Amino acid sequence: MSQKQPVCDHLSLFLLLGPFLGLWLAFWLIPSFLGFDLSLRSSDFTSHAQSVLAKESQHPSSTTFVGLQNFETVIHDVRFWKSISNSFLYVLGTIIVTLPLAFVLALNLLSLPKKFRSVLVFCLIIPGLAMPGVLSTLFYLFFHGREGVLNQYFIQPLGFQSVNWMMDPNFIMPSMILQSVWRWTGIIALFLLCGLEGIPHWQIEAARMEGLRLWGRCQAIWLPGVRNLLLFAGVFLTVEGFASFSGAYVLLGGSGGILDSGLLFVTYLYQVAFPGGSGSFDFPRASAMSVLVVPVVALFLFWVLKIREISRDL
């Protein structure tokens, strides 16, 4: 029995992890390898491949490899660094506004009766469940020139001039951040509400008996109780922000806005890979951009989680 037990354990482990590893291999590892291979080819690789299929090419396939030339081009690309800085500001602004707002909403929802709480939670999570294109269209109507809801009902009644939110470089990025905040605040508030409900009630009662006020209870009980959820929400918003495309595309038409004020990383990736930006299907350079950025973001998130583990052990 002692010899058969390890075999059964290995078989069970394979049955549990096999589907995940198979999907990971098919949809992540193999595409990543092919993307890295594509980043080492010349920009005319697509047309060359089509000509090979049509038996019209006179050049050997080895001539399509250019080594690190695409990476050098990307590193010296000013718009690439502009898209990275815009994505960083977009992610940072979204996290700074969304997490505190979601925490405050979760605390207020916790104090409500359950029958009212369920209705409000459902209303809050609707933006997160809706398609990004639909939300972006609604937001476009919200910000659209003088006829937009924000100008008609908030800016003009206060006596201020209408703000052209989508054409003024000073307001394009705040508009995009506000769109992301509107979409994700309800979902994250739901996560935090679940975490707050999991805190033992006796801890709250003990804090009240000791005379701790609201801020004292936040520091001693509520914030430590949802610390891991806040970290998860921050990681989620970081990944979603760097991968964001549809919202910016609907609002700005894939152009990045005036002076590239709203040019995000994936938006520029789309412009390079398709005729909207470079005028050609430059998939190799777009692949090189992804190969440069994705590992950096993954390494940053890894160190965030590692620092969290170290601080917890101290």
Image: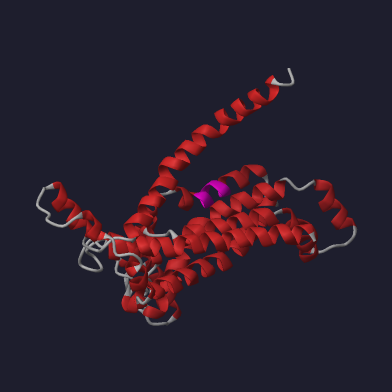
Q: Residue furthest left?
A: 56
Whole-percent x, y for residue 87 in the image: 45, 68
Q: How is the image coloured?
A: secondary structure
Q: Residue at x 71, y 46 (%)?
A: 197
Decide which of 209, 59 is in the foreground and name it: 59
Q: Residue furthest right?
A: 210
Question: Is residue 181 visible from the viewing direction of this image?
Answer: no
Which region shows up in magenta? 120-125
Q: Is residue 152 above or below residue 47?
A: below
Decide which of 136, 57 is in the foreground and name it: 57
Q: Quadrant of residue 281?
A: bottom left
Question: Is residue 244 visible from the viewing direction of this image?
Answer: yes
Q: Residue at x 44, y 47 (%)?
A: 29
Q: Residue furthest bottom?
A: 160
Decide which of 296, 277 is in the foreground and name it: 296
What is the total number of numbered labels drawn onto the structure image? 0
- Would you say 252 lies left or right of 206 here? left
Whole-percent x, y for residue 97 in the image: 56, 67
